[in-house]
Image: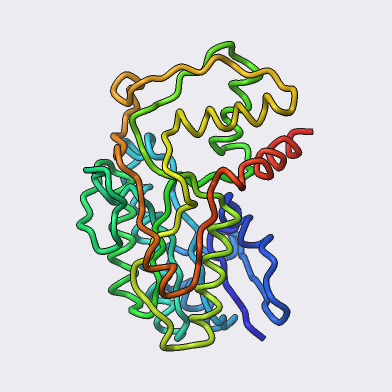
Amino acid sequence: MTRILIAGGSGQLGRALIAHPWPDGVTVVAPTRRELDVADADAVKAWLQASPVSAIINAAAYTAVDRAEIEIAAAFAANALGPAALAEGARAAGAPLVHVSTDYVFAGDGSAPHEVDAAIAPLNVYGASKAGGELAVRLGQPRSAIVRTSWLVGAGRSSFVAAMLRLARERPVARVVDDQHGAPTIATDLAAALATIALRMAADEAAPAGLFHFANEGDTTWHGFAAAIFAELAARGMQTPRLETISSADYGAPARRPMNSRLSTARIRRDYGVIPRPWASALPRLIDGVLGDRT
């Protein structure tokens, strides 16, 4: 029997991991925060001793990018100390750790996709806290895979797709940033990639470790992504707002964002055979899921 521990099961990625069609013989356990505080190293060790697992996937994170600018301690507690505790516990238990990170560890310079070994230089507190988590995992459990992703979207009420649906229903005009470039990542697709890595690391001690990137295929902007969403809504006979562009500077978010969030997926393709599909091909089903969640 293969047991996979999922930390952060209540988030949009955690829910996608729980719902993933795992192979026969695989059991997924996703304790709540009350049942297991992943930032408590002693609690993590005790839990793993009492409930051994084959691998750990850490999808827990503080993701309020703008609020992190004033809630610095909370961001670092979740995004750096939590992974540190999980890495310490995983190493003591002999379990590989698959940890999710972000494109926000990069400054976002240039226009080429960031390679996994490119220098990191976060622009905001959230990115810095995630960079701290990466370092903690790499040092705390060498048998780990850190998977950076970008622009994660799922069927939950807090996703970008859900936000665009609200705009379509409530406003005649939508102004969306058009100078940040990257690729949306569908939560179910990222969950499948993480599952592939975790199962292989659980079965093979020589499975590749280190840094990886995963994002769906297709270079766009947030404005371009919004346009694709509204086109899908219009095709369903729904009203859509007039879409206008706005710069990041004019939008005025408290936290600076990288202008280039493109990620090279060459290593995850080579080492794990994970081939990301175009985000545009996954969008219709994702929108169906968001709409279904609101009926």
Q: Residue at x 60, y 46 (%)?
A: 281
Q: Is residue 112 above or below residue 193?
A: above
- In this view, the residue in front, 73 or 62, is 62
- In this view, the residue in front, 270 or 101, is 270
Look at the image and tell me whether residue 259 can be seen: yes
Direction top: furthest residue: 172
The quarter of the picture where the C terminus appears is top right
User: Relative to 20, is 159 on the left or the right?
Assistant: left
Residue 30: percent from left, percent from top: 62, 65
Residue 204: percent from left, percent from top: 48, 88
Q: Residue at x 43, y 77 (%)?
A: 89
Residue 48: percent from left, percent from top: 53, 79
Judging from the image, the colouring scheme is rainbow
Residue 275: percent from left, percent from top: 50, 63
Q: Residue at x 75, y 23 (%)?
A: 237
User: Relative to 39, is 280 on the left or the right?
Assistant: right
The mark total stands at 0
Direction right: furthest residue: 295
Q: Is residue 46 above or below residue 135?
A: below
Task: Using the rendered view, name the quadrant where residue 247 is placed.
Answer: top left
Look at the image and tell me whether residue 128 can be seen: no
Q: Residue at x 33, y 52 (%)?
A: 76
Q: Is residue 115 above or below residue 64?
A: below
The quarter of the picture where the N terminus appears is bottom right
